[in-house]
Image (spheres, rainbow, N blue to C red):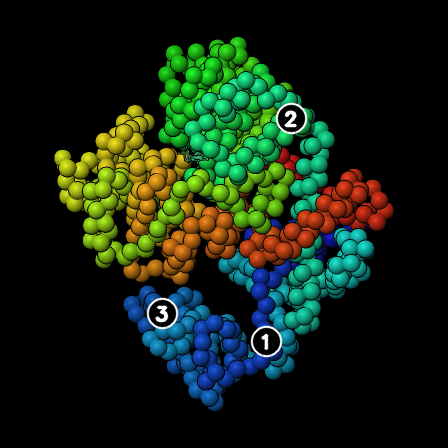
Amino acid sequence: MPNLLDNKIEFLKGVGPKRAALLNKEAGIASFGDLLNYFPFRYIDKSHIYKVSEVTNDQTWFQLVGEVSALRVHGSPRATRVTATFSDDSGSIELVWFKGLKWLKEKFLPGQRYVLFGKASAFNNKFNFVHPDVELFDPADQSVGGVLQGVYPTTENMKNMGLGSKQIARLTKTLLQQLEGYIPETLPEYLILEEKLMRRSQACQNIHWPTNNHSLKLATLRLSFEEYFFFQLRLISGKMQRERTSRSFVFQRIGALFNEFYSRYLPFELTEAQKKVIREIRHDLGSGIQMNRLLQGDVGSGKTIVALMAMLIALDNGYQAAFMAPTEILATQHYHSLKKLLGELPVSLALLTGSSKATERKLIDTTLQDGSLHLIVGTHALIEDNVVFSKLGLVIIDEQHRFGVAQRAKLREKNDTPPHMLVMTATPIPRTLAMTQYGDLDVSVIDELPPGRKPIKTIHLYQHQRLRMLSFVRKQLAEGRQVYIVYPLIKESEKLDLINLQEGYESLLRDFPEPQYQICVVHGQMKTEDKDWEMQRFVRGQAHIMVATTVIEVGVDIPNASVMVIEHADRFGLAQLHQLRGRVGRGADQSYCLLMTDFKLTADGKKRMLTMVNSTDGFEIAAVDLELRGPGDTQGTLQSGQLEFKLGNLAKDEKLIRHTRGLAQKLLTADPALMQPQHAVVKTAFMQRYATEIDWGSIG
Ligand code: ADP
Ligand code: MG
């Protein structure tokens, strides 16, 4: 039976070839099914008509009926603004437009009644409506006085072709009539009953044209349940498949290197959390199934030593290990700290970065291939094709969110047998994301900081309080501490940012004159040697202040640095702020983070500053970050879109995600290949959903 949902959108009554092309281009709607899945992003409650006098807040939506008068154009000849007065028998209120001005003049006729819909804005202690939705009032129009009307996403181009929200609503109405009886169920009957879910056909009807708030809620629940459920099915089935097919080396032995390191070179007692994670890794490495583990641990929680111990297990079993970091500075630091940690152990270690010299490079190439080089630390340089290992058994990727999926995949493909993978991140991933984005990885968490760390004190200061910041810095320097001062770097205007940093640096030179104070500078556009030189001055304590862009964001570890000043802090996202703050607080001294901003902040900016001041818990911060920015942005890992649920909201749906994950797991355990008759509908829907996608199930 041909599937009605596959019909081209062109053939829906009221569309035609031209609008079909536009729908396809602007909204990705090519078929009946696509339109069916094109949901409103909000609903207008038109059940109540308010009075102008009732417009007393800027939070709720108001529907008013009244007359429009006194249309006036303000500003230059090119007209910057149009105002009008909207009145009913209770009073009047101002309407404001900043564009579409020409069209406005023709729109409103005196003596006519209009229906207005919008949110009010507070301005000069009064309320007005900016760009409200105003239309001729037609008492017969059923959307007025009706109940909930969906508002669909549209674009300017679509509106110009008569494809505004209202027109799309009309199309969905036609569509639903045509599809009556043809919207297939996608969930097994028993789940619908057990979970008391609305049936799919009814849910589709109600998501577009809800009969009331309750049915809208049920429809939304049903459809987001379905989204999460299928998403989890895909993740879990991918993981199960990999576990069946993805064999890797068995590292059975805990040998001399591991044991000797543990007994002789371990510089401190491991935290319980570190021990737990090492146990988890040991288990994976001995299982014969390829390890695909994500290690999450807040900045400073001690992931490096865990990585080292995992690598020693690989070495003990006769394999090589690679440790990849996102920046040269970080790779170099890892190299040095691993070298120090390894002490006299017979492990050969090398560093490979973009600036490794040809001779070093050659030596690395030969020793990697003949197996005499055991452990290599490096940057992206490691994934180049000409880097060939003799027996690569374990790959560790630090700060994994800095790498793309493809880059990680390349390391994985260095062998015929895929090496074990451990990816580490200091950006805590909210649980909901961990269950979605990383649902196919095993996750270990270091949820405990090494003992003796004092929580970092965070203070938010405005620019006019600079003197306070400077005198605080002076005091800390007098106590022998070192200080970071970080400037934002925004890609669009790297030049400007540099000026920013340069000016900041020069004014700091005046505030902290040589020779008493030494200031070093590090930014992304410096040559590597210069950068290293400057870094080294700070590491050795020869420089007291480091002025930097975010190149120091990840990993750098200097225990004596106890103050982090972040200039224009509101230009940073929460994850970045948290990362930056994590550069201090690594020693025994009380550390501080000073967030400098202008007095004027966006609501979002305020919330970020407040969150930083109030919390040092990476998970909590990540959750706020997710709420503020949405999943596309929280991590650099995924192209946006991959994680955008149509209805689901990762910041709010933790329970539902967990629940659907459990159900998907149960279903697949009972019926891994979806062969049971009751799961036929699931199988069909699953294939339809994911048939065209690449298999990205194998992150890592
Ligand atoms: P991150 O998880 O941010 O990569 P690091 O591995 O760089 O953290 O560790 C941060 C600092 O804490 C390092 O100086 C490290 O030597 C130290 N450290 C790690 N584990 C412990 C521990 N169990 N006890 C004391 N210090 C530790
Ligand atoms: Mg680290």
| Mark 1 or mark 3, earlier in chain | 1
Task: Work out whether 215 lies above or below 154.
Answer: below
For residue 286, the mark is 2
Q: Residue at x 50, y 73 (%)?
A: 60
For the residues labelled 1 and 3, the Cα–Cα distance comes to 29 Å
Instruction: Name the residue that disc number 1 marks.
Output: 46
* Amino acid tagged 1: Lys
Residue 23 can be seen, yes or no:
no
Q: Residue under circle 3? A: 81
Q: Secondary structure at mark 1?
A: loop
Q: Residue at x 78, y 58 (%)?
A: 194
Pick whichever, 351 or 172, lies toward us: 351
What kind of element bears circle 2?
A: helix
Q: Position of residue 346 (x, y in %)?
A: 47, 14
Dividing the picture into quadrants, the one containing residue 101 is bottom left
Task: Establish whether ligand 1 lies closer than 8 Å to the Cβ of label 2.
Answer: no
* Marks 2 & 1, CB-CB < 8 Å contact: no
Displayed-image quarter of ligand 1: top left
**Quarter of the image where one finds residue 646:** bottom right
In the displayed structure, 648 sits above or below 428; it is below
Which labelled disc corresponds to residue 80? none
Image quadrant containing the C terminus: top right
Q: Nearer the viewer, mark 2 or mark 3?
A: 2
* Secondary structure found at label 3: strand
Q: Amino acid at mark 3?
A: Arg
- Amino acid type at circle 2 is Gly
Between the residue at mark 2 and the residue at mark 1, the CA separation in whole angstroms equals 63 Å
